[in-house]
Image: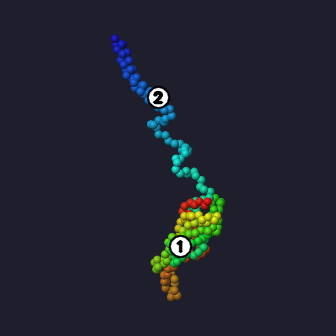
Amino acid sequence: MLAVSYNSLMAVRFVRMIPPLVLIFVIACSRPPNQPDSSTTLQGLPFDHSTPPSGSSNPYIIPSPMGLPEGTFLTVRLSNALSSVSAHAGDGFRGAIDEPVVVDQQTFLPRGAQVSGRVLDAKPSDGPHNPGYLRITLLSVDVGGKTIPIDTSSIFTKATQRNDRPSSGATSPAVSDVLLTPDRRLTFRLAQAVDLQ
């Protein structure tokens, strides 16, 4: 009688365990074969270079072979004089490349290539404590018969106060204005890369 009761008890326990086991089996079989486990975080490999999404920048793009990079220095020789006495904001000036611009052993701008610039600001001297000044920048360069717009740093030059010594021996302060003569060499820096094609 005791043996029958023990067997009956074990059978009842086994029957109760069947539904959870069936449920686990059904869930495991219903998962798609190639779906990753959501409980784990997948991390890309260090050298996994998948295709970047549309619109994203590609760090492996090679610059144009006919372009000058940002930061290129342009040394220019002025063709006309500029003075803080007579110049006004918006006035233009001309010059020429004085040193060939060479990148990777290739000459992009030969000596003599014409450039144009603009006066950004100018002020004549109006007293011993207010010397004259000029601020200028380049606007374009002529390459192969084409005028290419460029964006460069500006050059600011300010007159300095000097002491003139009269024959009496006393010092008398005098303020000068800025005068950039023709053939004056100035060096500008490209603020943005420029395509010369």
**Display coloring:** rainbow
Foreground mark, 1 or 2?
A: 1
The residue at 48%/36% (across/down) is 36
Q: How many marks?
A: 2
Q: Which residue is denoted by mark 1 in the rendering? A: 91
Q: Is residue 31 left or right of residue 105?
A: left
Q: Is residue 26 left or right of residue 104?
A: left
The residue at 60%/73% (across/down) is 79
Q: Which amino acid, mark 1?
A: Asp
Q: Cβ–Cβ below 8 Å for labels 1 and 2?
A: no
The residue at 52%/77% (across/down) is 86
Which image quadrant: the N terminus? top left
Measure the C-alpha gap from mark 1 to mark 2.
Answer: 81 Å
Residue extending farthest to the top is 1
Q: Give SS at disc 1.
A: loop
Question: Mark number for residue 29?
Answer: 2
Q: Give SS at disc 2.
A: helix
Q: Position of residue 105 (x, y in %)?
A: 65, 60
